[in-house]
Image (cartoon, rainbow, N blue to C red):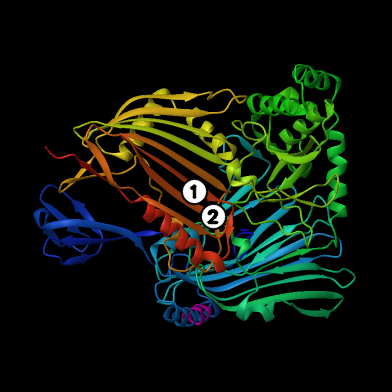
Amino acid sequence: MRRRWALRAVAALTLVAPALAETVVLRSGAELAGPVSAVDANFVTLADGRRIARAEVREIRLAEKKSSSQATVVDPSAAARGRELFARADAMAARHPGADGVQLVDEGRLEVRADGTWVERDRFAGMILKDGLKDSWGTLSRDFEEGRERVRVIKALVYHRDGSVYSYDPKAVVVSAPQADALFFQDTRTLTLTLPQVEVGSIVEWELETDTYNPFRKDFFFPNWGFQGAQPSYCSRVSVSVPASRRLYYETENFNGPWKSRARPRVTTSAGRTTYAWRLDDIPAIVSEPNMVPYFDYAPSVKFSLIKDWAPIDGWLSQMYVERLKAGPELSAFARALTRGAKTDDQKVAAIYHWIQREVRYIAVKMGAASGWGGFSADTTFKKRYGCCIDKALLFAAMLRAVGIPAEPVLLNPNDEARHEFRVPDIWFSHAITRLKVNGRWIFLDSTGSDYRYPELAAFDHGARALDPLKGGERDIPVPAPEHNLSDYDFRVTIDAAGAARVEFSARYNGAREGELRGEYKSMKDSERRRFMQDWANGVSPSAELISYRLDNLDDLDLPFTLGMTYRLKDYLVAAGDLRLLKLPDFQEEFPEVALARRRYALQYSTSLEKRWRYEVALPAGMTPVSVPRGRLRGPDESFSLDCESKPGKILCRADFSRARRVYPVSDYAAHKRFLDGVAHLMRERIFLKAAGPR
């Protein structure tokens, strides 16, 4: 399942350029196969001399012609291999109707050499059953680092049911710089290859080798393997071979149910080497679900290491960080000047946090392990005014230290990646933020973004588990209480005698939500913002007319971001006999994440949240409420309340939705679904109004 694709030519195979097959389709539906020699205003002429009136021809189809001479492997053993794979594939396809494809071989073999280098060989075979897999299974792609890794193809074939077998053209292999975000530069290359003659019903098979002949540290061997994919698999297996004098440390995850007994490896020793091997058979496909937790949080997997604990990693990183955190005289003086007017430590931290977000652009330049994990020095990033997450985290910590605030960088995976497992050490962290001590307590801040008001940080950091190299050990980043990720809405609605409504809306935010919205609106042009607000109002009613809108403190991180708008709704009240129905404007939530009756995998949100609504609805003279909605619901660490009351000439409504959890295991899904379905039902309820009749 862990693909490290490498490519080279298979020397014994011959290749011929593709020919084009042509089929003339007549308006009657008949098809004439054969090359077309000429087309003029009156006739289509075939190579064999046949002439068809142009008016009778509906289309001429061109397609690659399969020829026994085109990249065909004539080795009888290859044809026999194809028959073996098709027999296995047909049996699997019958057991898994509707699958896009069936995976027949999924194998990884890793070998650590005595000199500390290592090689990995991956094997794959699968039959394509639907068009959607032709691109992904018919194209190989592998990132590698020049000067450290070599990649090659041991075998790469495409089998057809008629017995023909095709190999790739070595000239089709392309090595290029990766197509990445313009703000991210890496010293890597991507090798890609499109296999020939890949069709629905064909089988692709390849064997690839990646030779890490020059690792930046020979004890830093941290592969992992996932056993389950999006298509059903006949079997998935991985083995790691090490010199008998060395020990392999490993950790298995999610070997549940029938796989529990397979969590322990088969260990064998021979010829001075010890091999650890795992294998799972008849693996069902992963069926995608809304808001799934990341892959390694649910799929059976194993990770490996040659080191027992985190001390070598902490030592390696700390050595770099200690030097890079030293602020030179210019940076120290700048940090002190920036915070000179601050009266509290909170004000000092806010001043530095907001300055880095505003003034230091996110651009990643990574040219090897030292800059990738260690970053550039705080002084360098300060002078360049750009850097990646670790560069900004180091600069932030250095500036805080310069004004007397304890701080240090920590490494983590955002919560849209798997929660990091610390039982076996590794270096696979994709993000860095800053841990600091203010007012006697340690908190986390992420200066990578540009829109978060102190002391908030992006939602993707919430609930993550971080490595603290300088102090050692892991740190849990808390999920904030719901009220610290609040959207607070206020509506003043005036209904006129004709049933139209004027709505004055304002919103206040805090936490990650405030930063997200600030960033979204900052990225829009003025014309786009007005169009967005008009679309928002039209979501309440298609007849909505936007009167005005405002965005407050959009560019000032020291002040809270708020917004507001006023719009008019024509014919907003709905007649139902002698009653009128009123729906509270913009008071409806959809919960597609609980659309399934049951789930296989845990459900994940980015963070906690709270939403509050307040409505003051002014009624026209003579109109009174007949009934108003009320209700209270509770779910697993979540609640909802709706209270409406009648006052002379108006209706007052308050609602509150609160969810403290970020992740719901399968065992809590049914209760969570009942709660959200109940919330959606309550929010759809209408207020019934009645006008006073004639006296």
* CB contact under 8 Å: marks 1 and 2: yes
Q: Is residue 440 magenta?
A: no
Residue 637 picture location, percent across and down: 57, 57
Location of residue 75 with respect to 680 vertically, above or below: below
Residue 663 picture location, percent across and down: 59, 57
Residue 427: in sight, yes or no? yes
Q: Tell me which segment is drawn in magenta.
A: 81-86
Q: Secondary structure at mark 2?
A: strand
Q: Nearer the viewer, residue 119 or 348?
A: 348
Q: Mark 1 vs mark 2: which is more N-terminal?
A: 2
Residue 38, which numbered label? none
Q: Residue at x 59, y 25 (%)?
A: 559
- Pointer 1: what residue? 657
Tell me the chief SS of the magenta region: helix
Location of residue 603 with respect to 105 vertically, above or below: above
Q: Residue at x 36, y 36 (%)?
A: 536
